[in-house]
Amino acid sequence: MILYGLCGEDPSVHFSPHVWKVIMALRHKGLDYELHPVAFTDIPKLEDGFSPTVPILRDGDVLVRDSFDIALYLEDTYPDLPSLFKGEGGRAMARFVEGFSQTVLHPAITKIAVADIHNLLAPTDRVYFRKTREARLSQTLEELASNRFTEAAEFPRKLEPIRHALKFQPWLGGDGPLFADYILFGAFQWARVTASVDILKADDPVRDWFERCLDLHGAIGRSVRAAA
């Protein structure tokens, strides 16, 4: 298998939250893969323009895009390997967690880390990234960076639904991690690798959960250095 994942100027610094979901899913399934790092501006050249974004997974002659679609593909194609969902309920839960992550956590992390992400990129990618993100966010990167400490201070209160779940079980998936855990892990790993300010307090149960996620699957999450 080949997994195409976003990287900075240093190809070893891969930071996409969506790619990290797939990395964890592949490891969970015990599947071998090669991670091919790719820059923002090179994504349109991949697989004859198959997708404007990564992750892209090639499994033989099959191409799959979108992290959730890739997880579903892995689950359905390799049903005898450890399950990512443990049934329809797990799939439905993961959809809810995806919505929470992408509508609550991702916008906040973007505001905190967007200027740091820019600085990780190669020069050509920096031009592209600044133009597209400033248009999307209606602020300059410098304006966003000036507010990152305020955004980071407000971030922990957004995590109360996660803390509530962790009162009753060690993982969102129950006794062990499932794709729902990997969705949230992707968001926090994105912040860990890019943001110059820490978003998790030392005594936060979510930090304890995240540290355990980093240790999963041979500590693959720790293979990329933390920014902060």
Image (tube, grey):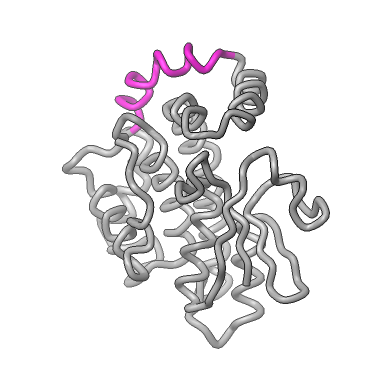
Q: In this view, does 105 lie above or below 208?
A: above
Q: Is residue 24 above or below residue 48?
A: below
Q: In this view, does 76 lie above or below 90?
A: below
Instruction: Give the percent coordinates (x, y) of residue 35.
Output: 55, 62
Q: Nearer the viewer, residue 95 or 216?
A: 216
Total number of numbered labels? Answer: 0
Q: Is residue 183 magenta?
A: no
Q: Residue furthest right?
A: 48
Q: Nearer the viewer, residue 23 or 184?
A: 23
Residue occupying the point 23% across, 49% down: 205
Residue occupying the point 50% across, 62% down: 23
Q: Is the magenta stretch mostly helix, strand or loop?
A: helix
Residue occupying the point 58% across, 71% down: 88
Instruction: Give the percent coordinates (x, y) of residue 55.
Output: 63, 54
Give the position of the C terminus as an image quadrant: top left
Q: Is residue 84 above or below residue 12?
A: below
Instruction: Give the percent coordinates (x, y) of residue 184.
Output: 44, 51
Give the position of the N terminus as an image quadrant: bottom right
Q: Which of 126 and 50 is in front in this view?
A: 126
Q: Nearer the viewer, residue 195 or 40?
A: 40
Q: Which residue lies furthest to the left in this view?
A: 203
> For this view, does 126 lie left or right of residue 104?
right
Q: Residue furthest bottom?
A: 80
> For this view, does 205 lie left or right of residue 69?
left
| Extent of the magenta region | 139-155
In terms of image quadrants, where is residue 70? bottom right
Instruction: Give the percent coordinates (x, y) of residue 200.
Output: 28, 39
